[in-house]
Image: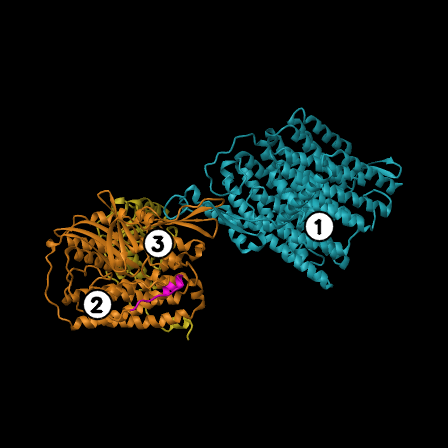
Amino acid sequence: MRLLGVLEKDSKELLILQDRNQLSLESIDNIKEKFANYTMLKNRDKHIGSKAVKGNGVFNFRYGPVTGGVGDAGVFNIYTYGERILSVDIDPGYKKRNIETLIKNTALHQAVNWSENVCSNFAFSHSCAFLRAVEKAGSFRSDEVTQRIRIIGIELERIYNHLYVISRLSKGASQNVLASHLEGLFEEALRTNKLFSNSRFLKHTNDLFIDKNNFKKLDEAALKTKNIKEKFEELYEHSLASWNFIDRLYKTAVLDQKKALEIGVTGPTLRAAGCREDLRVYEKFYDNFKIITKDKGDVLARMQVRAEEIMLSCDMVIDQIDKIKKMQQNNSKIDEPSISGFGMGYCESPSGLVLYFVNMNKGIVQDVYISTPSVFGFKAFADSFVGYIFTDFSFSFDSFGINFADCAR
Amino acid sequence: MKSWALYGITRKLTEPFKKLEENTGKMDKIFRRSLNIYPIDVGNNGDLNFEMAALAAPQYNIHRFGIFFADSPRHADVLLVLGRCSEKMVGPLKETVNQLPKPFNIIIVEDGTDFGISARDLSLPNVIAYYDKKLEAGEILSVLLNITGDKK
Amino acid sequence: MIYTIIGLYILGSFTGFIGRKISYSMAIIASAFSFIAGFEAKFMGNTLSAVFSFLPNITVGINIDGLSGLFLMIAAISWTAVSIFSLDFGNHYRKRMAVFLNLSMLGMFLILTAYDALTFLSGWEIMTIASYFLITEHEGAYKEAFQFLAFGELSTIALILAFVGLNASDGSFVLIKADSNSVVFLVFASLAFIIKMGIVPFHTWLKEAHSKAPSNASALLSAPVTLMGVYGLARVINITGYTHVWGLLAIILGSVSAFWGAMEAAAAKGLKVLPAYSTVENNGMILAALGLSAVAYSFSTKSTLYEFAFLTAVVLSITHTIAKTLLFLSIGQAKEQLHAENIDNVRGIHKSVGKIPALGILISGLSFSAFPALLGYVAEWMLLESIFQSYQFSSILDRVVSLTGGVLLSLAMGFASFSMIKLIGYSALGYHHEKKAEPMPTFFMNVAELFLIAMIFGISFFASDLFLGLGYSKFVIGALGIPQGWLLASAEPVFGVISPAFFVLVITALSVVPFLIYFRSKLTTKKVASWNGGLALKEEEYFTANAFSFTIEHILRFVYMTKERTNKNRSYVAISDVFESFYKQIVTFIKKISYSVSRFVMNGKVYFYILYILIMFILIFVVFG
């Protein structure tokens, strides 16, 4: 059982819990189990990480909010007495946009737009999780074609995000040729997205009902995806032969399984620590899916999980496109103003679980709680980075595939 | 197994680039062959950050136009303000502008959302271009080529 | 002259009970006279002497020959500066400080001018005991002072043994123009002086005492007091002549000491611990240079190396005495006005305390890092040149020892630069943290610092004149477009050359044009706060001095015995000097033994005491009866 969020409602605390694919909302008084990440989740907008360390010669090596290295607005308070990292405290407040408040009292389409704007690189996962929560609230399910198109979107998102992470890792390790080629592939992946959905970040596509006829360039997208897979396979094989590269990643920022479960981190980070958990296995239309795990829990393991997932995702995209083309779509429509009640929905985003709790009233969003993978990812980074040196910062940070936009909402 | 160097030079990823005409101000001609840009995220939803990453891709090959990413605002000629400003980022943005060496220029690209404060309302100096919609990597490159004048 | 100087010092120590200012002024005058006396003896050839018969066969007295004169001049520069400095600095301490300052200088004067062993010993003891009291002037420094005294007395015992050896070999206690081959004398005298110089493994007292003592006393202890050791060694060589084995041992001990001192200085965090370790390093270099001179002499007197190496030791001594006095005085002023003990807590001295002490730290620090145009540059160039010339040695042993020593010495120079950059960067320069210095009269402190700064520049500029004055005209040539008398050469025939004076002139001339262009140009400099991610730096966000040296503490963790500790959310790095732990263990062991012995012997039972007395009686009768 995993604690994914702490929700305050009518001055009562409700815990959002997840056990395999079962989500539940429980009052804090009914739960006996203590969660190690409870305090972290309560303060997720103020600071994530561990406390400041004091001592002779210890200082705060503040990194951010404006840096060339991370390029994302947020502050890392890194406590050190030289090279050794003693504690990391992260302030995500610089990117706080209060989307959960902005989303309130908006109609469904506007709300989907907001959810996509939480974090563009997980835009499709966010909108998926949101729409699935709405479906739960309205107690209906979207049709097969819509679900299969969503799978394509989610997997395309995974491909470009994973490519980006691996290109960052190779750039951090000064593997410039590899990095350049991966950046090239990343740009190709963005172009594939545009072919598929007319948006480089798969925005404005997701809906309760997606019309298959809107997708005119599916064949080209499939072809491009095939190319990306072939090229990536070659690059990946090549990169694993480079000792210089592997040496930088091996045994860096190790996060063991126990710690990972305690933090509540999901996605490739958890799978790289040896945990066989991927909620996609519970979904009906994922065909030929297999969970990829590694057991070292270091940067290298996280990269390997991501790399193998890229290839798997490419296959799934091509396969799903093939299936959709053969399918007939019934013209079903959902009456939006009829949706009332609350529901929770999740989506296995490239970096872990995105979860939405939604409360709807006649098609208008009343209340929303967003649990994002980056919150857990930042905590995992802060904890695993302790004991290493600042030179490892870029690998350690990039390997989690997290960003402040996702974390701060 | 080829070495990375051989692997690299046997593939050409760079694409010819045709710039679009944009209505921007012009910088001094001295920046034509060397333009150092420093992107600053002031609270965008992330896609402009990823577009900047895409701009570094070999398809665009911005180095052939003499455009480079600076590592610090102190080395930059152009500050690219990405997104609309969150409350806490107003101070750091102003400090970043303060650190730019003269002569400098500022390009503001917003992401088309309506949270936060528009950087245009912060009365920043030397704003040479302003876009209230999201730009893609290729479009950003076009803007950069436009501000440095007509280069073939 | 001699009587005037001694009289002035004694008068100075008496007037110390009346008024500090008068007492310190006496010290200034006496020190100035000492310099003149030394100058006359060295350069004019006027040997001042006051010798009389004390007992049959025993003559005591004072005699200033060339060697004494040279060292007297060096020491007198430091004495003068310390005395001037104390005019202001002494206000915050008790009057007895002035008494002991005068006495300790008197002790040193007697050492440098002693005609015979008895005068030498009395000077030695006066200096040691006066220094002991000077250290105790700092509140709570009893432990450190006692450690100083313990090592001081150890060297006295060694000295007594040495003089017994001297007397056994030639039947007299005379030191001047003596000639002896006594091994006992050589061994024990060298031991005594090495202890005084703070050579590893006898350096632990130095770090403790120097860092705890009041700063004027630290300057005195670190520069002229250790110089007494150097003078002692020079005198020993004068008496016994060069010994090959002694030279080899001196190279080994000296280079190890230089390396160890520099390495520990690099990791030091205390404001005065760092210069104290730097003293260990510098004295190591001096000893190594003397050793090299001895080895070179035994190898061949045809080569000029032995003379050059000796000259190196002299120049190193001059450099160390002047620059270390300056360093301790400047740091002392800052420490006194800011009430801080650590390098980290005195940042921005140039703003909080003043430009002159900051300049003092800067110049002395740069001199120790062998920055061109400063005296340290000449000295370290000479040391390296001496090492390079050891290629001439024919014996494998000589070659291996001098080469290994050379490697250690070069490493020491590197570490020294590192530690000095740390010291300068974090204390003299560095960001000012709005710390307020306690206001106090600083005129004389600044005069003393400026005087020493001028010395560092001046002696370096006129180094060729110094060479000529000391009688080494063979090392002063003219070549490469530099007129005769301005180029220093490291051997005859020429091996390596520098001209510190022309270096300064050329650099000045070359920088005229860039500066003119800079001042003429219309480009303006935009001044902004340091860039730190778009936010202003907070106090706890500054890179600390500890962090600066953590990398080497980590790399050399087996040498430093680096331990990274965390205790109740407080983290720190602990390093230790392995020799210190060694002495600590000895102390605990001795304590244990003395405790059990005292429990056994002094057990408060009367019959036991009577028994003890009886046994002693019987023993005495048996032995002497």
Badge 3 crowding class, 10 Å Cα cut-off, few under 14, some 14 to 19, many 20 or more, is many
Q: Give the chain coloured orange.
A: A
Q: Is B40 on the left-hand or right-hand side of C424? A: left
Tell me, for residue C488, which label it has, or none: none
Asked if residue C36 can be seen in this view, the reply is no
Per the rendering, the colour in which chain C appears is cyan
Per the rendering, the colour in which chain B appears is yellow
Q: Position of residue A351 (x, y in %)?
A: 31, 59
In magenta, the rendered stretch is A290-303
Pinpoint the chain carrying mark 1: C
* Label 2 sits on residue: A285
* Mark closer to the chain start, 3 or 2: 3
* Label 1 sits on residue: C311
Nearest the eye: C164 or A328: A328
Residue at 77 percent of width and 54 percent of height: C243
Q: Position of residue C123 (x, y in %)?
A: 75, 37
Q: Is residue C373 magenta?
A: no
Secondary structure under the numbered disc 1 in the rendered image: helix
Pinpoint the chain carrying mark 2: A
Asked if residue A294 can be seen in this view, the reply is yes
Nearest the eye: C101 or C206: C206
Q: Is residue A292 magenta?
A: yes
Pinpoint the chain carrying mark 3: A
Q: Is C572 on the left-hand or right-hand side of C88? A: left
Q: Position of residue A319 (x, y in %)?
A: 23, 72
